[in-house]
Image (cartoon, rainbow, N blue to C red):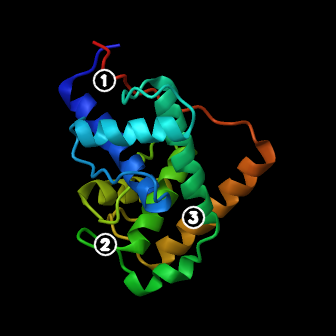
Amino acid sequence: MSFRLEDRAAATRALQGYLYELSRRFPWMPVVYPDGAYGERTREAVRVFQEHFGLPTTGVTDRLTWERVYRVYRETMDYRTRHADPSVGYADLPLAIGSRGYAVQLLHAALAQLADHYETLPAPAPSSLFQYSSASCVAALQKIYRQKQTGKVDAALWNRIFADLASKQACDAERKDGAGYPDVYDPTDG
């Protein structure tokens, strides 16, 4: 499989975002900041992750490693959003470009999970900063909800997102069919 340089950087940035969020949850994980460069810090974080989860310790993100990182990240985010009190974010509303903090993290986690259910909804990179890409994801969801596409999250949209997510999580729990993982790259490939 071959990738353009931009694709590799985007996939690396996504991986780093997942690893960064995992480092916030697991103290044994080295902190990696999403910069799109698969450097020594990323390799070390991948090696530590692989070792901890019983994978071959290479520092290379092969498909097996990617799937495990993604699954652990999603399980962590599922737990966070399932056990989060959506009213916690109210103090930070509305959310718009430049907003930051826990409410933005919850929003990104919720959008990432909803992206599994809505084909036209892109999943945002995990972050505590509301960026242009966040506004784009929100606007896509507003389009799905047939709302004015502002790219901003007010209290009404916040409540709708978390009600929608709770409904989807309940359906998923009933099905338990184990949705597939995204197809990303092995940095040693092509």
Vertical arrangement, residue 115 with respect to residue 146, above or below: above
Spot occupied by residue 82 in the image (x, y as percentages of width and height): 64, 65
Amino acid at circle 1: Pro
Q: In x, y percent, where is residue 119?
A: 50, 40
Q: To which residue does mark 2 refer?
A: 100
Whether residue 164 is visible: no
Q: Position of residue 94 (x, y in %)?
A: 36, 79
Does the CB distance between marks 1 and 2 fall below 8 Å? no
Residue 68 shows up from this direction:
yes
User: Whole-Å distance between the Cαs marked 3 and 2?
Assistant: 17 Å
Q: In the picture provided, is 155 more to the left or to the right than 174?
A: left
Q: Which amino acid, by three-letter code, is at mark 3? A: Arg
Of 56 and 23, which appears nearest the observer? 56
Residue depicted at x 33% and y 54%: 31
Disc 2 crowd, CA 10 A, few/some/many (<14, 14-19, 20+): some
The structure residue drawn at horizontal position 23% and vertical position 71%, both measured from the top left corner, is 98
Residue bearing mark 1:
187
Please give the residue where the numbered disc 3 appears in the rendered image: 80
Mark 1 or mark 2, which has the lower sequence index?
Answer: 2
The three-letter amino acid code for the residue at tag 2 is Arg
**Sequence order check, earlier mark of 3 and 2:** 3
